[in-house]
Image (cartoon, helix red, strand yellow):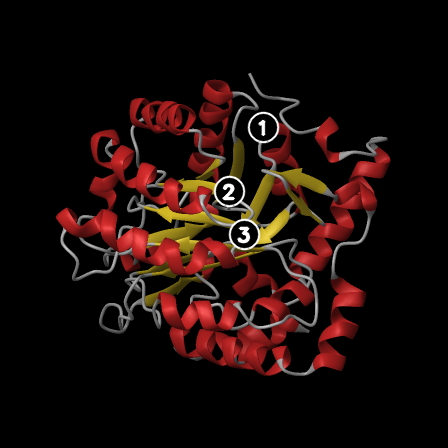
Amino acid sequence: MYRFVFSQVLSRLDAEDAHHLTVRALRALSVMPVVKRLLHRSLAPRDPALRVQAFGVHFPGPFGLAAGFDKDAGCVEAVSALGFGHVEVGTITAHAQPGNARPRLFRLVGNRAIINRMGFNNAGASAAARLLSRPRGVPAIVGVNIGKTKVVPESGAVDDYVTSARKLAPLADYLVVNVSSPNTPGLRDLQAVELLGPLLRAVKEVADATPKRTPLLVKIAPDLADDDVDAVADLALELGLDGIIATNTTIGRQALTGAERDLAQQSGGLSGRPLKARSLEVLRRLRARVGDRLVLVSVGGVEDVDDVWERLLAGATLVQGYSALIYEGPLWAHRVNRELARRLRRHGVVDLRQIIGRTAA
């Protein structure tokens, strides 16, 4: 049914307009307590074998929604009710900003991919904090992804991230420093360890001071050279971070196939199926470097239960998706959870930890 709606209706709308319609619908659902609870009871992960603990947080399942969908933390409950084991909101900046000029979101249907150059459009940390502080009608594990305000120069980046962290870390189950989006000028430069170190130290000081000590992760780009991936991993261990999210969108277009290669030369980050191979490669490299000393969250090209299973075996404790939601529809997470639970039972797995990193080098 959803594929018919997508092909006949949604695919004919501007990609960003379709996204806004979806978010508005989910926000409306979030204020319908009975419907929301019924959906959560029907679709949320409930199989005990799916439960997993990461950085002291208990997740009902390993599969969550990546940052980029719920930019302002306005539909956390609705997304959780659809079956995602956690929701990462953002990217949120200290100050509200409109993002880049439209058009800035493009579907590549033949490649099951998305190109975006949104530019961290969001209402700012204070607005997100107000939404996140509201009581919830259904359980939700919420990660908060923070980035640099565009108009803030590199010299002010640390203070800018710290401002967001002070407002949002107390409300988050975990906090993510995003230095890997290609759509904010100069942002990826902060992945260099000489700049990343002071930034992460400052944010970690804020996260550590929250009443429950908010876990801190860093999100990296797939376009980092292997040596730079190793350097960030070493820095995360040195600073005592809780984990690494790998990976963000890519500026590369090499993995695109067909006529859409010619349509995809506009700037922006590419996500979806073409990112699958590199995202998995970075995950395996990180696992080889850090073992189980850090929680690894794998995102990029995740489409189905086979991808989730492969990422878990390669060493991810949590797995995220986003682009495939556009192509698979609102029951996507529920299907992945159901099929993952069946596969675990088929393999005699009663605890997810039994398979995490099983095929890691």
Describe residue 108's horizontal placement relative to residue 137 as left or right: left
Q: Is residue 314 above or below residue 246?
A: above
Q: Residue at x 38, y 23 (%)?
A: 238
Alpha carbon distance from label 1 to label 2 = 22 Å
Neighbours of disc 1 within 10 Å: few (<14), some (14-19), many (20+): many
Residue 16 rendering spot, x and y as whole percentages: 39, 74
Disc nearer the start of the sequence (2/3): 2
Q: Position of residue 308 (x, y in %)?
A: 63, 42
Specify the quadrant that holds the C terminus: top right
Residue 284 shows in the view: yes
Judging by the rendered image, the residue that carries numbered circle 2 is 215
Dot 2 amino acid type: Pro
The residue beneath circle 1 is 314
Q: Which residue is mark 3?
A: 321
Q: Where 178 falls versus 329 (above or below)?
A: above
Camera-side residue: 182 or 346?
Answer: 182
> Of 69 and 291, which appears nearest the observer?
291
Q: Amino acid at mark 3?
A: Gly
